[in-house]
Image: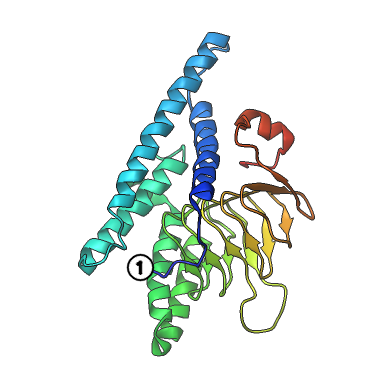
Amino acid sequence: MSQAKPNTPRSSTTDTTHRRRSGLRLVEQAFNALPSTGSARDERERLEEATMGVDAARASHDCASALSPDRPGAPLWRRVRDGLIEDLDAAVARDPAATSRAQMAIVSPGLHAIWGHRVAHSMWEHERLRLPARVLSNLMRATTGVEIHPGATIGRRFFIDHGMGVVIGETSEVGDDVMLYNGINLGGRTLDKGKRHPTIGNGVTIGAGAKVLGNIRIGDGAQIGANSVVVKEVPDGYVAAGVPARTRPLRGTEDPYEALFADPELWI
């Protein structure tokens, strides 16, 4: 059920930048999840604890990469099992309401939609199974509220939080470690056949209600604000917010709390 990943090559510099961006998001989530008394000392301790948690998550991520479900020679059942576990761990790491793998496996519509799509996509690659693939896709839309065309290519550790109203078009390509919120549309701007949907790089976060339209590329580590309308390419490590979306670089030392004031649409 593994899928071919979109061709989004990453240099070592880009990889480092992506890890820094995702680290900011994880620190911000962990920081907000910890109880606070309001004192300056308490705030410092919360930040240290949040940072320690992110370091542990990164170590877990590195171990998961070493045990990649795509590694050659592994039997199908093991690749399927490892892929499911990898998706579950990605969901638990990104959803502050998650308490366990078991909980997410049972109640997360985003995960159910992703798993259904992985099956539908593997069917889509065989010409005679394309109609059943579309049927399965429609069933997943009815049960999860997420519509992913079976022709779309989805990378590893993909997560959709809440899920309702997400639409991903046929020629969309989504990289690894991407997170979407509800109400997002990866859509087209033309009725012509061929590549007409966006390519999403690795480590991208797209806020609730955002529309990314046309055959454009969203660079590695980019962040798209909630309810933004993106019709032009976004460079690696940039923030895009507004209608139409305006872009700016996300500075590597930017504090997540301050970034929320600069672009209130982020992380919504």
> Residue 137, relative to residue 224: is it above or below?
below
In the image shown, does 119 or 4 lie closer to the viewer? 4
In the image shown, does 19 or 110 lie closer to the viewer? 19
Say whether residue 39 is left or right of residue 101.
right
Say whether residue 14 is left or right of residue 241.
left
Residue 65, image x and y in percent?
A: 34, 51
Residue beneath label 1, please? 2
Q: Which residue is drawn at the image coordinates 22% and 62% (left, top)?
A: 78
Say whether residue 24 is left or right of residue 239.
left
> Residue 68, relative to residue 134: is it above or below?
above
Residue, far front: 12
Q: Which residue is drawn at the image coordinates 30% and 45% (left, top)?
A: 63
In the image shown, does 16 or 229 lie closer to the viewer? 16
> Residue 192, relative to residue 78: is it above or below?
below
Residue, far bottom: 128
Disc count in the image?
1
Secondary structure under tag 1 reads loop
Residue 193, image x and y in percent?
A: 64, 84
Quarter that holds the C terminus: top right
The disc labelled 1 sits on which kind of residue? Ser
One can see residue 99 in this view: no
One can see residue 96 in this view: yes
Say whether residue 209 is left or right of residue 64.
right
User: How many residues crowd around disc 1 within 10 Å: few (fewer than 14), some, or many (20 or more)?
Assistant: some
